[in-house]
Image (tube, coloured by chain):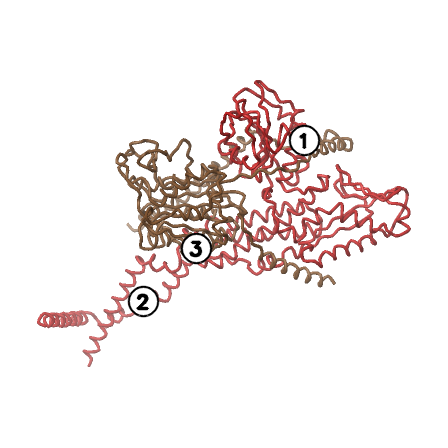
């Protein structure tokens, strides 16, 4: 009888698993938005890549994604470069209307921290345990992620900092790991680099919408130079994206289809590509703010007004039941953490760490001594 | 023509010289040393091929710890197959009456009702759930107690502050033998209704998007926000000490709360200033009017989730706020997975001091929102029963999430054959599975839900640690096909020397053979 019921349960479970796979939805189910913005090239003459990425930073911030949900990777700081005539500013246009660097900017990875390894670690969330929370991509199955990359690239690769490169396969595998661990709802992958459309060609995980600036064997062009800055200030693809996105407000109903329709060869000078095969929803239903904004919803929740009253009533009756001093003691133990307490804990931790460091050092010193001794014995015995 | 002939001549000359040189060398050396050299060369090549290459291949192999894949797959395919959630209800009969076979009779009905559920795949429970009745003395104050009392008519009273339920029955119902049915109904339809609902298969798909993921620690941050810079204060400390502590006590076995409070000034609303002051605020505009990213209120100070509870007063300039959706002077809102906000219509006056008595209804509202954010069911009214249901569900949920992570890890290791799987991953997988075994023990043998919860947190933690192991990043190793390229600086010179030595020995042998003939 028992065995029968177990088999029954298995049957029911397998049926339920099959039925679960059949659901389909049309409007986005995300509850939070994240953005990962990466500029991979160094040096002053790549000013435009910094401007590209800051254009996107400005847009997502303006449309409501908080800094804690934006991961900004800047491999070089052109705003404070000595060759920058306008210190502390980055402009996207020779008219210098919009200062992309803005008043408050939070760069999460800068300079030599922008590496392929860190980028992959960020996507897969594989860090050492003490990696700061603000520098991690803490997404879940309800997160829409906007990933923007710019730099110098080629067929299926993107160069990082003149030192290494990331291939389309690397990103595809990272996305698959994110999908496997349910770390995203949908991804918008946008890339502005030469032969950009090859970068998303190897992706195989579902619910990824990709946009690239140029086809295979095609360059991605810069828009124009600023005479006083002395270099090209922005790439064409990003320039026209920004131009369109500046029109979008938080409550806008414009869709990704509208954005993609605004691309044309005369403006961008290269053939933009849109990777749709992994994306199930109709672009007409995908709002631009599904990826570029963070619409905070407000729920008019039904409020119960007597939970604390019930509990407080219970407290009184408990005191009647038990020894009252015992109760008081228990109440004292409740952790009402104030900042001092947290600070104390940190100090304790630091002490612990330095202790273990000392131990390690001692161990290392002993080993070093032994090695030296061995070498000298060897040396003298030879003589 | 000429040039090529000259080159040919030169080639032949070179060859001749070479063989001459070799034959000279051979003559200068004894036959023994020649033989010795041959052996040396051959043995080096043999060592190179048969020892060196395999050792190199083995040592540069990517380490992939053997994961217990069959067991994890089995767990993933038959979720909770070996788990039992078993509740006990302690019966108390008043009025000097005795029903010795009431537990047995009721148990038959309960089992029948629960079996009915398994017939419909949507209604079936994801875990073997049952409840039993006994006349034993309850072991602690936290047990479910069902009191039977004679009354004029049948009725049920679920106590709101303890886990005691009273069932009123008439003597007529004893005569009709309806009492087991009433008890079954009370238990399944009232006391454990929510719990059963939570475990139903059909309710697993719908995930409430308001609810944060379970974490054993949660930070609660109470904030008083005002649009102006006028000095204000509030008695939040006293209010929390007095009213809120029983709640932290209630949750102590489920979540440990840390609490802080803060006053923030100059938090303006994103209103477009118009001449017309009485512009109505619409519900769907709120998300643009309230801009949290500008207020700098969510801090990632703690390594665990934070919920924010905000009491908001507008500035003098922007008030009164004209809510289109409500005529109240204060309107509470729930912000999914983030917290709650109470908007006031009118600003605070200068030097306002908010008394704790004013904060009591505010805290009541926040508590209600907190319940929603933590995923507590809406009914029954009794918070203890609600928390109990959630606690049991969380054990199973954590467990399934953990097993899900492990099976994701497994899929990952299969789909990426070049990824390394270090020992630490295997250890974490083993720890997670061990914790799972402990849960089975705590649930099936001891009915100890609190310890089972602690173990389920471990399952979750270790399985995530295993999946997010920092060594498992492609940049820490290189694919097998790149191996030869990477080691070419080592292999190249070695191979070259070996091959040249072999060639030399072969040519020596040729010359010697030619001489013999």
Where's residue A284, x and y in %? 48, 49
Mark 3 lies on a secondary structure that is loop
Let me know if marks 2 and 3 both belong to one chain.
Answer: no
Label 3: chain letter: A
Q: Which residue appears farthest toward the front when viewing the image?
A: B276
Which residue is located at x 62 percent, y 26 percent? B237
Q: Which color has been applied to chain B in this rendered view?
A: red
Let me know if marks 3 and 1 both belong to one chain.
Answer: yes
Mark 2 lies on a secondary structure that is helix
For marks 2 and 1, give the one nearer the viewer.
1
Where's residue B360, x and y in %? 67, 28
Contact (CB < 8 A) between labels 2 and 3? Answer: no
Q: Residues within 10 Å of mark 3 (few under 14, many from 20)?
A: many
Instruction: Specify the quadrant that holds the N terminus of chain A.
Output: bottom right
CA gap between label 2 and label 3 equals: 45 Å
Question: Toward the viewer: A65 or B216?
Answer: A65
Q: Earlier in the sequence, mark 3 or mark 1?
A: 3
Which residue is located at x 79 percent, y 42 percent? B165
- B136, above or below B247, in the image: below
Q: Residues within 10 Å of mark 2 (few under 14, many from 20)?
A: many
Question: Toward the viewer: A89 or B240?
Answer: A89
Mark 3 lies on residue: A203
């Amino acid at each position: 009888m028992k065995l029968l019921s177990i088999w029954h349960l298995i049957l029911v479970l397998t049926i339920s698993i099959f039925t679960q796979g059949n659901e389909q939805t049309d409007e986005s189910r995300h509850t939070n938005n994240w953005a990962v913005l990466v500029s991979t090239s160094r040096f002053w003459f790549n000013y435009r890549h910094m401007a590209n990425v800051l254009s996107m930073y400005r847009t997502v911030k303006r449309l409501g994604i908080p800094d804690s949900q934006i991961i900004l990777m800047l491999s070089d700081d052109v705003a404070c470069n000595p060759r920058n005539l306008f210190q502390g500013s980055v402009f996207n246009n020779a008219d210098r209307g919009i200062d992309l660097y803005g008043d408050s900017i939070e760069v999460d990875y800068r300079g030599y921290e922008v590496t392929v390894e860190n980028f992959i670690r960020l996507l897969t969330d594989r860090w050492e345990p003490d990696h700061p929370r603000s520098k991690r991509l803490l997404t879940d199955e309800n997160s829409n992620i906007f990933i923007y990359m710019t730099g110098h690239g080629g067929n299926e690769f993107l160069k990082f900092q003149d030192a290494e490169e990331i291939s389309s396969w690397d990103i595809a595998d990272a996305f698959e790991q994110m999908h496997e661990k349910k770390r995203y709802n949908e991804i918008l992958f946008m890339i502005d680099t030469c032969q950009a459309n090859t970068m998303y060609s190897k992706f195989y995980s579902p619910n990824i919408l990709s946009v690239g600036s140029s086809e295979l064997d095609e360059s991605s062009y810069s828009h124009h130079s600023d005479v006083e800055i002395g270099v090209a200030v922005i790439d064409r693809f990003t320039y026209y994206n920004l131009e369109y996105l500046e029109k979008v407000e938080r409550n806008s109903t414009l869709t990704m289809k509208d954005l993609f329709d605004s691309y044309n060869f005369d403006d961008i000078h290269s053939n933009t590509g849109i990777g749709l095969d992994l994306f199930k929803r109709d672009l007409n239903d995908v709002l631009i703010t599904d990826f570029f904004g963070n619409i905070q919803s407000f729920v008019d929740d039904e409020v119960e007004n007597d939970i604390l009253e019930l509990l407080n009533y219970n407290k009184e009756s408990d005191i009647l039941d038990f020894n009252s001093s015992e109760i008081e003691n228990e109440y004292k133990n409740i952790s009402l953490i104030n900042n001092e307490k947290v600070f104390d804990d940190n100090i304790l931790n630091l002490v612990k760490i330095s202790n273990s460091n000392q131990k390690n050092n001692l161990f290392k010193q002993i080993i070093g001594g032994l090695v030296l001794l061995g070498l000298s014995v060897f040396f003298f015995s030879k003589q | 023509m000429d040039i090529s002939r000259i080159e040919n001549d030169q080639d032949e000359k070179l060859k001749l010289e070479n063989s001459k040189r070799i034959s000279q060398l051979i003559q200068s050396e004894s036959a023994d040393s020649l033989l010795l050299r041959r052996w040396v060369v051959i043995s080096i090549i043999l060592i190179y091929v048969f020892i060196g290459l395999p050792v190199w291949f083995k040592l540069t192999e990517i380490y992939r710890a053997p994961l217990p894949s069959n067991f994890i797959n089995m767990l993933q395919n038959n979720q909770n197959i070996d788990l039992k959630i078993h509740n006990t209800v302690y019966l108390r009969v008043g009025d000097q009456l005795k029903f010795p076979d009431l537990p047995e009779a009721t148990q038959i009905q309960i089992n029948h009702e629960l079996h009915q559920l398994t017939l419909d795949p949507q209604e079936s429970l994801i875990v073997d759930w049952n409840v039993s009745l006994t006349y034993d003395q309850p072991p602690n104050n936290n047990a479910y107690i069902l009191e039977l009392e004679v009354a004029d008519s049948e009725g049920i009273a679920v106590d709101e502050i303890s886990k005691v339920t009273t069932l009123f029955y008439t003597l007529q119902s004893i005569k009709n033998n309806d009492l087991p049915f009433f008890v079954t109904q009370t238990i399944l339809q009232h006391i454990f209704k929510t719990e059963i609902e939570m475990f139903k298969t059909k309710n697993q798909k719908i995930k409430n998007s308001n609810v944060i993921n379970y974490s054993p620690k949660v930070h609660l941050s109470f904030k008083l926000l005002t649009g102006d810079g006028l000095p204000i204060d509030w008695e939040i400390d006293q209010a929390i000490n007095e009213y809120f502590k029983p709640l932290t006590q209630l949750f102590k076995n489920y979540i440990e709360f840390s609490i802080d409070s803060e006053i923030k000034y100059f938090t303006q609303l994103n209103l477009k200033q118009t001449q017309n002051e009485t512009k109505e605020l619409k519900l769907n505009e709120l998300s643009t009017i309230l801009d949290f990213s500008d207020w700098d209120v969510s801090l990632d100070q703690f390594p665990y989730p934070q919920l924010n509870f905000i009491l908001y007063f507008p500035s003098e300039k922007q008030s009164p706020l004209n809510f289109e959706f409500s005529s109240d002077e204060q309107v509470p809102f729930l912000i999914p997975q983030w917290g709650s906000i109470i908007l006031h219509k009118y600003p605070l006056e200068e030097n306002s001091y908010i008394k704790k008595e004013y904060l009591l209804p505010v805290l009541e509202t926040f508590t209600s929102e907190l319940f929603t954010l933590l995923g507590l069911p809406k009914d029954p009214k009794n918070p203890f029963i609600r928390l109990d249901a959630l606690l049991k569900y969380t054990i199973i949920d954590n467990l399934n999430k953990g097993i899900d992570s492990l099976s994701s890890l497994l899929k990952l290791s299969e789909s990426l054959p070049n990824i390394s799987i270090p020992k630490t991953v295997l250890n974490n997988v083993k720890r997670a599975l061990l914790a799972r075994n402990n849960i089975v023990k705590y649930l099936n043998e001891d009915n100890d839900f609190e310890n089972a919860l602690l173990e389920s947190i471990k399952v979750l933690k270790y399985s995530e640690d295993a999946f997010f192991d920092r060594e498992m990043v492609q940049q820490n190793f290189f694919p097998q096909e790149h191996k030869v390229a990477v080691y070419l600086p080592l292999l190249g010179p070695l191979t070259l020397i070996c091959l040249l030595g072999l060639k030399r020995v072969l040519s020596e042998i040729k010359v010697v053979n030619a001489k013999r003939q």
